[in-house]
Image (cartoon, grey):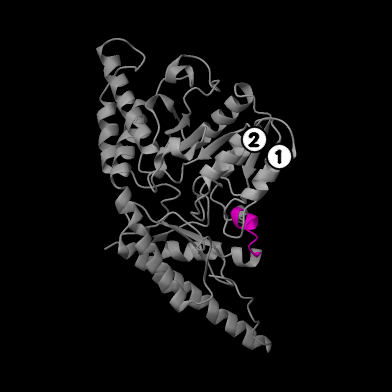
Amino acid sequence: MTMKRAYLDHNATTPLRPAAHAAVLRALEITGNPSSVHTEGRAARALVEAARRDVAALAGAKPAEVIFTSGGTEAARMAFHAAKTAQGIERLIVSAVEHDAVLASAEASGLPVEIAPVDGNGRLDLNALASLLSASDGKVLVALMLANNETGVLQPITEAAALAHKASGLLLCDAVQAAGKVPLDFTALDADMMMLGGHKLGAPLGIGALVVREGLPFAADAVGGGQEMRRRAGSENVSGIAGFGAAARAAYDALGEFAALADLRDEMEARLTAAAPDAVFFGRGTQRLPNTSYVTAPGLDAETLLMALDLDGVAVSAGAACSSGKVGRPRVLDAMGIDPVLAKGAVRVSLGWSSAAGDVERFAESWLRAYERNRSKTYTDVYASGASLPRLAAVES
């Protein structure tokens, strides 16, 4: 009998929620175009607007502020386009740990891009941001994620927004990784625009949203028809939108259950620490998402480790999933000042709505087997060479 695999890569994508699956199937039975005025068209429009209300509720926003997109990447591109063409933005400040979708979209905008540094935990340096904001003239847009996709570290969005607004600037919040994992309140965060991605919270792939503060000037990136209140042309993806709405509603209702995943995560980290005292958990010294652990130990190699875990039936990743399946040097850990030798072995474990204690146990057992194999090999190699075992520099874990 084939053993069920342990899927622990929810920050890459999370399984489709049953409610979203059912909503997609129901929507596929509807023929009408949401822009049509006949009965069928109005039925499709009703699905779209119901989903808009559910997504707005999850985001703590008004339904009219929600623009449906194909995902977080398109939302980022739309935000930077509007910033440049409608909001008078002349330069961009992007944190050093932003997702590649945000950094690449910022660089493609044609506006000057400055990088705001982070501390050793991967949290934005607010003093450095204040210095960047005051260093030159020109209206600025600050791009800052609410939760990092690799470390799970939560960023000081409200404080960064206050600094941006004091400098007569704006703030774009990437909430793709945070939505459905921690409570969201677009108004309280004081962001001007916010990105969401459906598949991170149990909706189908290929659906997302850009939330735009009411009254903020906006220019569409995609032109054509008048869909999405003339802010994003193209016939709406009704089935994807319906699934997004259902997933948003389910995620909102289960926020308390999601928070409890921190107990599973913390138990796993405690077990690894007990058996591998030199294990390091990045971002552990500050607030993180309840589901995320980014772990390494001296001497490990992430590519080899991922293959070993996969053969043991465990799915995790070495960081962001949007890198053509390659395991490369982690840019986020570089920004945090982590030794490249230590960063080389880092893997991300991310739990989700379908995770169980057995999944975490299976990962811990597999990771520790790999750790012990590496440790035995290190001792064997050192003994064969006749050298003394090196002393490892102390690293806070």
**Image coordinates for residue 195, horizontal then vertical, percent:** 48, 36
- Give whichever of 75, 234 is nearer the camera: 75
* Numbered mark located on residue 167 in the image: 2
- Give whichever of 327, 397 is nearer the camera: 397
User: Dot 2 surroundings within 10 Å: few (below 14), some, or many (20 or more)?
Assistant: some
Mark 2 residue element: loop
The three-letter amino acid code for the residue at tag 1 is Ser
**Image coordinates for residue 233, horizontal then vertical, percent:** 48, 19
Residue 186 on the magenta span? no
Q: CA distance from mark 1 to mark 2?
A: 7 Å
Query: As displayed, is residue 367 above or below residue 187?
Result: below
**Image coordinates for residue 174, horizontal then vertical, percent:** 51, 40
The answer to which of marks 1 and 2 sits earlier in the sequence is 1
Give the magenta range. 332-339
In this rendering, the count of numbered labels is 2
Mark 1 residue element: helix
- Residue 390 is drawn in which quadrant? bottom right
User: Dot 1 surroundings within 10 Å: few (below 14), some, or many (20 or more)?
Assistant: few
Query: As displayed, is residue 379 above or below residue 184?
Result: below
* Residue ID at (71%, 39%): 134
* Numbered mark located on residue 134 in the image: 1
Q: Is residue 30 visible?
A: yes
